[in-house]
Amino acid sequence: MADKVEISLNINGRDYSATVEPRKTLADVIRDDCHQTGTHLGCEHGVCGACTVLIDGEPVRSCLMFGIQAQGKKIRTVEGLADGDRLHPLQQAFTDNHALQCGYCTPGFLMLATGVLEANPDIGDEELNDALASNLCRCTGYQNIIKAVREARDKMKSA
Amino acid sequence: MATQRNDMLGHLGDSVNRLEDPPLISGRARFVGDVNFPDQLHMRVVRSPIAHGLIKGIDIAAAKALPGVVAVWTSDDIADIPPIDFREGSNPQLALFRQYALARERVRYVGDPVAAVFAEDAYIAEDAAELVELDLEPLPVLVNADDPPQDFKDGQTTEAAVVEQGYGDIEKSFAEAYKIVEVDVKVGRHSGVPLECRGSVGRYDAARDVLEMHGAAKVPHRNRETLCRMLNRPASGVHLYEGHTGGGFGIRGELYPEDVLVCVAAMRLDRPVKWIEDRQEHLTAANQSRQQRHKIRAAVAEDGEVVAIDDELWLDQGGYIRTHGTRVANMTTGTLPGPYRIPNYRSVCHFCLTNKTPAATYRSPGRFESTFVRERLMDAIAEEMGMSRLAVRRRNLIALEEMPWGRDLDVLGDSVEHDPGDYEGLLDKTLEAYGYDAIEKELAERRANGELVGAGVSMFFEKSGLGPTDGSKIYVDVTGHVEVVTGGASIGQGFETAMAQIAAETLGTDYRRIKVVHGRTDRIEYGVGAHASRATVLTGTAVYETALQVRAKALDMAADLLQTPADRLTITDGVVHPEGNPSGPSVTLGEVAEALAPASKARGKRDPFLMGEAFFHIDHQTYPYGLHIAVVKVDPDTGGVDIERYIIGYDIGRAINPAMVDGQLVGGLAQGIGGTLFEEFAYDADGQPLAVTFADYLMPTLQELPKPEILLTEDFPSIRTPLGIKGAGEAGITGASAAIASAIDAAIGVPGAVTQTPVTPQRLKKILDARG
């Protein structure tokens, strides 16, 4: 076990400082030290994508990174999606289309989709499917997730 | 039904947005991993690395010496804690096979807990666990349930029980049979694998002398009973709390060794203890399911009537018998005849322990397996008799005029009695709705052009609404907000929304004004939780009965307040008003509640509060029914299967929220496809698990799944519930492997080719290669 180090993370525009072991994963630092528990852990080996956050706009598996590696970067999590009481179009589309059941994978899907749609607002259905296939959901069978993300894409484009 | 429909408010039958969603989409939910208490310890379990062995010694010195470690336990430290008991109470015949929280004398599967480390931090606990040294002497390993049994302990063999069910005259039926058709088929080992791993937090509050377990799910009240028995504590001194639950599917929420450990440790170490499972642990420690081999034969008459079925099966139970006892064996043998008459029947299940992770229920337990086996047999009969696959089924389906159809079979303590339903009618409707004849015609043309494409149909009956009883309490406060307290559980299925819709419709208020409590043993004394597609049927009907009571009380009080007879009043959007005159004199439900306050003079002799409590008892479970149709394309080079279309026909009786029913069917199907084509807990000859990460245990992504087409009918509301509700939780998965197997047979032109699931590309390639 190495000595703890002090790190500073910027999450949803707010700075957090934490004293952690260098080996502590970004997901654990976000959850345990910054108390943003909306980011979930589903496998801790980079397959399921439940822990997806945006780092400088890119969807990233926060279980595969150390907290210390995210210093100086802009981290975005599900807690930062809504604008006050106004839901992000993706959040609204998820509830409108019954795109979640247990909701455990939902933050990861929301952040993945946010990153994908921000990078490519005109993304086609097929390409979108390819992107969304990188995360796992065990409840919904994905059909309503696809529907919700397409709806949000169309709304965000026309907004 | 007796109540008015409030169309504007989104009640029964409306696909309203779920009450559950706001915290879940905003990152404000509280799953067990998010539960923290000051001064808590973190537990890490040390698990057996071998499948079977004698425990010669456990050296904990190095682990204990690590800074930050508070305690390290082996079974000696909890020698007074009995093994985990069965949910339904003690069972002397099976008692020997129960699992202790920490293994004693022997380890029986890879993943068997042998020691527990308690430390200040989860990382330290994991470091320390790696320092625990195990001295294990390997013993012979039993990997297959159909191999000869070995000694388990004290002269008892690993064949823990033989579960037999049946009726009629098997010998005579086979002696007189026109044809005997036999198949030998296997269902692979897989499981629910919810996206959130398990976890629990134990906390002992000495000030109140209450032991709390957070992270409960599925059956909190039943687990409290078991914990009270095991720890010799009063019910008032043990409370379980269900927070958000990241998927259940039958496997989460049973009482596991880790749950017992955090509870005992919280009391003995006098600090809260948190345990969060990691995925590798989950894939060897949480209940697995399904693995069965059936040798099954049918006695068939000249016209295709299946006169008798005689089945022998081996169920692979794994290392111990957990909370379910032999329930999966019971459900398999009790439901195997399915939607067909089968006048003579026998099924004998060898319930056998092996050196693998213990098995128990997974969504549609017993029916997923028995439907695959029975429908494989029906296909084989069709082939042998020269009949079409559909014709054999039509010949044997129970007819509407014959309903309700009773059988001398037991399913979870209930004698099977099919509710009225038109099995053949639903088949016709579904085939017609999606143009099945045209589908078959097109597939035949494509096959003629060399493509490996085909369709398969499976039929099944489901069981739902496991009784016998459930209750609820409803309380309306002076602001007109409603609290519905249930003994149900929310595992992602939309329980809160369904209960709120039922209460809202009955009471005459907005479902968004209703808060639903579940999974809390401190709020209601009794509850059966969420399993067996029962929550909406049983708890929902209890909520309905309770809401009727509260409605009657509200109208009675309002009659005084409005000087109008109660039978001329109704309630709309939380306002009591004269029937047919919404703008007439009125009072709100909140004002009625105020009039019923304990100190209110207006109350008169009525009991205080606008509240009610009622139970609903059901005579038999409800038995919904349906069919699956799969259209597949097989890749001759890889053995891969592409599901081109998937159709489900299902009679739900009455849908409370059709979007949520649809979600259950689509989600269930996704798991069914996973278990049919990809997911498998394979083990090598030494009992080493071969699927311990998501790189080996392959769950479908959206690329592997079709967009199902669903015909949801409400033709036959259940005669056993006043709202006609039947369950929805399992019908999406039940028929999947059977339909896909049949479609693959058709696609490759080899009847009976699929004898084992999952049909992985490797297995199918072998079949294709043998076909030449």
Image: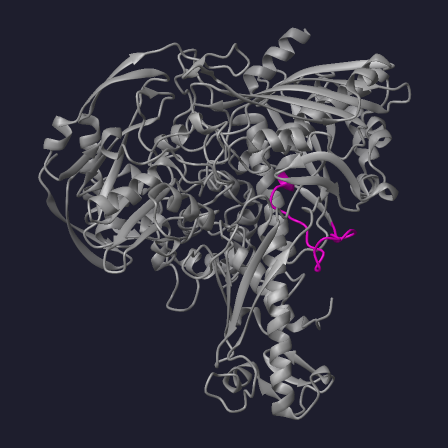
Q: Is residue B375 magenta?
A: no
Q: Residue B48: which quarter of the image?
A: top left
The image shows residue B227, relative to residue B334, as above or below, that is: below
Left or right: B304, with B271 as reference point? right
Residue B696, by quadrant, is top left
Residue located at (73% from left, 70% from top) = B2
Q: Is residue B461 visible?
A: yes
Asked whether B650 or B740 is in front, the reply is B650
Please, which colouring scheme is shown? one colour
Residue A57 coordinates in the image, percent (x, y): 33, 49
Q: Main secondary structure of the magenta part?
A: loop
Q: Residue at x 72, y 56 (%)?
A: B724
Rendered view: B324 above or below B568: above
Q: Which residues are magenta?
A: B713-732
For the residue pair B385 and B558, the one nearer the viewer reads as B558
Q: Position of residue B12 (x, y in %)?
A: 66, 63
Q: Residue A133 location, x and y as percent? A: 48, 38
Horizontal arrangement in the rendering, residue B554 relative to residue B208 (left or right)? right
Q: Is residue B761 left or right of residue B397?
A: left
Residue B635 vs B540, above or below: the answer is above
Q: Nearer the viewer, residue B313 or B120?
A: B313
Percent x, y of residue B131: 17, 26
Above or below residue B171? Residue B268 is below
Q: How many marks?
A: 0
Quarter of the view holding residue B342:
top right
Q: Is residue B731 magenta?
A: yes
Judge whether residue B451 can be spotted in this image. no
